Image: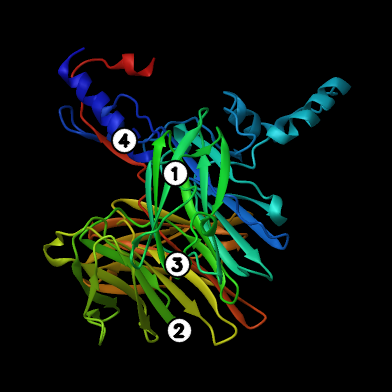
Amino acid sequence: MNRTTLSLIAGATALAAVTGFAAVSAPDPEAAGQRTGAAATLPVERTGLLCPRPSTSDLAETTYTSFTPVTEGADGKGTAVLRSAAQQSAPDENENEDAEGEDEKDGETTEKGDKDAAKDDKADRPVLQLKEPGKPVSAEADGADAPALVGTADGRFASGWTAQQTTEVAAGTGRGLQGVACSAADTQFWFPGASTDDSRTDYIHLTNPDDSAAVVDIELYGKDGELETTVGEGITVKPRSAEPVLLSTLTAEKQTDVTVHVVVRSGRVGAAVQALDDETGGDWLPASADPSGRLVLPGIPKDAKAVRLVAFTPGDADVDLKVRLAAPSGLITPAGNETLHLKGGMTAAFDLGELTRGEAGSLVLTAPDGSVPVVAAVRVLRGEEGKQESAFIPAARPIETRATALDNTAKGTTLSVTAPEGGAEIKVTASAGTEGGTPQTKTYSIKPGTTQDIEAPVPAGLEGGYALTVETRSGGPVYASRTLASTEGGVPYFTVQPLPDDRGMVAVPDASEDLSVLQR
C-alpha cells in the first residue's frame, strides 16, 4: 500500500475518533468539485447518535425528531434509523427501500403466519426512520416508558444527521419543558452545573450503543475539591442499554454546585445530565465544550431573571477569568463581575443576576493568555417568583460549517447567534414541516462581538415542526443556540440547546491511484 493510501486511511480513522464512528469512501474529484492533487471535502458516509431516556414521570409527553439536511455530493442510497436502546439491532439492507415502497404494495393477500410474524417483530420496529433528506420526521411517546434511543445513519442520510427529544412534564419535580439534542458516543465528558443538593434530583444518563459492556468512572468536584464517592468507579453499562445514575447516591456530601467528570475506561457511551428541581422545574444539562482557555456560552434569553455561572478548572492551577457579555451592541463587561477567580480543582459558582437586561446576550470567558483550561455552564431562570422555570447553557463549540436545531414551531422559537471575534455571514434554512410546508432560506450578517436574536425563516404553509439549519458563509467563528418556549398556567416553560457543528463533512487527501480496496 502506498503512502497516499495510508494518508487517506489515517484521515478516515481520525474522523471516526471524533464522531464516535464514521466512514468516508474514496474521493471522486469531479463529484467533490476538487482538482486532482488537492484535499477533497466529502460527506461523511456513516455516523451514530444516542438519545437518553426522556423522563421518569408518568405525566411526561415526549416528541422525538430526526432530520438530515440535503447535502451536495452525498450518496444516493442509505438509511437513518433510531431504535429503542434495549431493542436496537442492525438495520436490514433493504429497510429503506421497503419504507419508500410502502405505498406501492399491490394489496396481495398476506398469509396468517406472516401476519403473526409481523406482530411479533413490532417491538423491533424503528421509533424513527427518515425517508428523504430535507424533511424531518417525528414520533411521540407518553409517560415514563419512553425509551432511550440508539441509531445509525449511512449513505445520503449520514452527513449532518441530527436528532432531538423534547419533553413536557405537566407537574411534579422537573415540571416544564425539557429538551436535548441526541449526541455521538465518546469517552470523556464534563458537566459543570450539576447538584447533589436535597432540592435537586440530578441523574447522569449513560447510553451504550455497542455489543460489549462499557465501564465508566464518575468523578464529582465541589467547592472544596473532589468529593468522596462510594460507588462512582467501575460502573458497568450493559451492551446496547441505557443506565441512569442518581448523583446524590454517589456521595454523602450535599452541595449546590457540582462538576461531573465522566471517564470511560473501556468502550464508549453517550452522556447527559438531567437536572430536576422541586420548585423551578428542570432541563437537560449537555456536556460542556472541552476544557479551554476561551469559552463561549451562547444565547442567554433576554428576559432571564437570574443567571448563575458554574465553572471549573481541572488540575492545580488557579485562574482569573475575564468575563464579557456579547450584546447586540458589542462586547461589554458586566459591572461587578469583571473577573472571576477559580481555584484549581474546585467548582466555583457566581450569581450574575439579570445579566442580559432585556437584550440578547452570550457570555465570553477568557483565561489570561488562554493558558489555563476551563469548563463552564450557566443555569438560567425565567418567570416571576413562585412561577419560575430553569434551563442550562454549557460552553459550546463553534459552528465550523453547519448545524441544525429540530422541533421548531412557528411561534415560541428563538434562534440566537453570536460572533465574538469577527463578523460573519450565515445562511439559515427552514426545512419542510413534519406534516407539510415549503422550505425557506434567509441570509444574515452578524457584526463582530455581538449576539443577535434573529427572525428565523418559517416554512411556507407549515404543518407540524420543522428544522432550522445554520451554515457559515464567511467570517466567524460563529456560535448559536435555539430556545423553545411556551406558557402553561402562568409558568414560562422553556429549554435551550446550543447548536454544535454537525461534522457532516471531512477533508480527505486526494489519492493518485485507485483506492477501491477501501470499499471492501
* The furthest residue to the left: 369
Tell which tag, 4 or 3, sits nearer the viewer.
Answer: 3
Q: Mark 1 or mark 3, which has the lower sequence index? A: 1
* Disc 4/disc 3 C-alpha distance (Å): 29 Å
Q: Mark 2 or mark 3, which has the lower sequence index? A: 2
Determine whether 348 is above or below 513 in the image. below
Tell which tag, 4 or 2, sits nearer the viewer.
Answer: 2
Q: Mark 4 or mark 2, which has the lower sequence index? A: 4
| Residue 307: image location, x then y, percent | 40, 78
Helix, strand or loop at disc 3?
strand
Q: Badge 2 local density, few (<14 within 10 Å), some, or many (20+)? A: many
Q: Amino acid at mark 3?
A: Phe
| Residue 367: image location, x then y, percent | 18, 66
Q: Amino acid at mark 4?
A: Leu
* Disc 1/disc 4 C-alpha distance (Å): 29 Å
Q: Amino acid at mark 2?
A: Lys
Q: Is residue 73 left or right of residue 491?
A: left
Q: Badge 1 local density, few (<14 within 10 Å), some, or many (20+)? A: some
Q: Amino acid at mark 1?
A: Glu
| Residue 169: image location, x then y, percent | 66, 66
Tell which tag, 1 or 4, sits nearer the viewer.
Answer: 1
Q: Mark 4 or mark 3, which has the lower sequence index? A: 4
Q: Badge 4 local density, few (<14 within 10 Å), some, or many (20+)? A: many
Residue designated by label 2: 305
Q: Is residue 326 left or right of residue 359?
A: left
* Disc 1/disc 3 C-alpha distance (Å): 27 Å
Query: Going 67% across and 81% down the picture, which residue do you hit?
Result: 489
Residue designated by label 3: 392
Residue designated by label 4: 15
